[in-house]
Image (tube, rainbow, N blue to C red):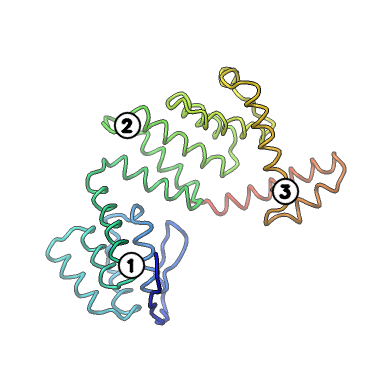
């Protein structure tokens, strides 16, 4: 978005909940932002009585509510209604609306599995790891889907592996990344596997994959991993990590395990379906 935008100062009494992201919408601008940026999360039942009440009563936009009801009665599809909402509230520029329209056109043409992957990827980006994994599994179970190519399946396995890594499920993450590499044969996936095994000492890089990477490149990746560990000391959790570095090696290792256990629990709570 660019330029200045006039935002409404209406304070809603009952925010509109968005279960997928665990947030609530408090204004017309937030509604537009959610529709524009998370359109791939929206299901066919997004335009419902609850939303219409929120628009007409909470946002004090009865004319927009009436217009939506008319469009529904005329059997307009959801894409047309979403575009009309953004146009009416005037939160986005014409050029931004053109980009949004392109997204809607892609959704019309895309196969169900492609749309589902987009939604799962959005969940992954917003750290809703468990929900993303559930959706990736659902896509992979689809039978007879012409869009389920080797490359598409590999991309799903890769992102599923990233989601498992977010939940600190290292073994499952490694399994998915291995399947992704078998399908895609991309070096960046080998690097992710290598880094994952550096992070979890209980894992080993599969021999065939280790042989596929020259020793000098593996050394470079080890250096990168060491640099990442140093950066961790200066992250938002710097104090806890810094205290560990001041301990002797035995107490440091015990402290690292305790800290990781606590972080794992935080992530799991955050990533519930």
Disc 2 versus disc 3: nearer the observer:
2
Q: Nearer the viewer, residue 244 or 142?
A: 244
Answer left or right for 196 relative to 88.
right
- Mark 1 or mark 3: name the one nearer the start of the chain: 1
Tell me, for residue 212, which label it has, or none: none
In the current view of this chain or complex, which residue is farthest to the left? Answer: 74
> What is the C-alpha distance between the residues marked 1 and 3?
43 Å
Q: On the image, numbered disc 1 is attached to which residue? A: 92
**Up-down: is 180 above or below 18?**
above
- Mark 2 or mark 3: name the one nearer the start of the chain: 2
Q: In which quarter of the view is residue 217 placed?
A: top right
Mark 1 surroundings within 10 Å by alpha-carbon count, few (fewer than 14), some (14 through 19), many (20 or more): many
Q: What secondary structure is found at the residue carrying circle 3?
A: helix
In the current view of this chain or complex, which residue is farthest to the right? Answer: 248
Residue in view at x 56 percent, y 40 percent:
165
**Up-down: is 223 above or below 34?**
above
Q: Nearer the viewer, residue 5 or 253?
A: 5
Q: On the image, numbered disc 3 is attached to which residue? A: 259
- Mark 1 or mark 2: name the one nearer the start of the chain: 1
Tell me, for residue 148, which label it has, or none: 2
From the image, which quarter does the N terminus lie in?
A: bottom left
Mark 3 surroundings within 10 Å by alpha-carbon count, few (fewer than 14), some (14 through 19), many (20 or more): some
Mark 2 surroundings within 10 Å by alpha-carbon count, few (fewer than 14), some (14 through 19), many (20 or more): some
């Amino acid at each position: 978005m660019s330029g200045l935008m006039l935002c409404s100062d209406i304070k809603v009494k009952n925010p509109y909940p968005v279960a997928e992201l665990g947030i609530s919408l408090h204004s017309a601008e937030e509604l537009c932002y959610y529709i524009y940026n998370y359109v791939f999360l929206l299901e066919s039942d997004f335009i419902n009585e609850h939303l219409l009440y929120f628009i007409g009563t909470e946002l004090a936009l009865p004319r927009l509510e009436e217009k939506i009801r008319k469009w529904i009665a005329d059997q307009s599809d959801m894409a047309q209604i979403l575009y009309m909402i953004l146009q009416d509230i005037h939160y986005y520029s014409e050029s931004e609306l053109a980009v949004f329209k392109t997204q809607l056109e892609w959704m019309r043409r895309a196969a169900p599995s492609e749309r589902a992957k987009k939604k799962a990827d959005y969940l992954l980006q917003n750290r809703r790891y468990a929900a993303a994994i559930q959706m990736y599994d659902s896509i992979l179970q689809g039978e007879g889907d012409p869009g389920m190519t080797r490359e598409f399946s590999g991309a799903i396995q890769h992102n599923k592996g990233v989601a498992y890594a977010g939940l600190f499920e290292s073994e499952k993450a490694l399994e998915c990344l291995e399947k992704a590499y078998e399908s895609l044969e991309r070096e960046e996936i080998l690097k992710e596997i290598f880094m994952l095994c550096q992070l979890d000492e209980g894992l080993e890089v599969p021999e065939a994959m280790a042989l596929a990477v020259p020793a000098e490149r593996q050394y470079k990746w080890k250096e990168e991993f060491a640099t990442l560990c140093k950066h961790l000391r200066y992250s938002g959790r710097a104090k806890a990590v810094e205290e560990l570095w001041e301990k002797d090696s035995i107490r440091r290792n015990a402290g690292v395990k305790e800290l990781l256990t606590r972080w794992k629990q935080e992530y799991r709570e955050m990533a519930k379906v």
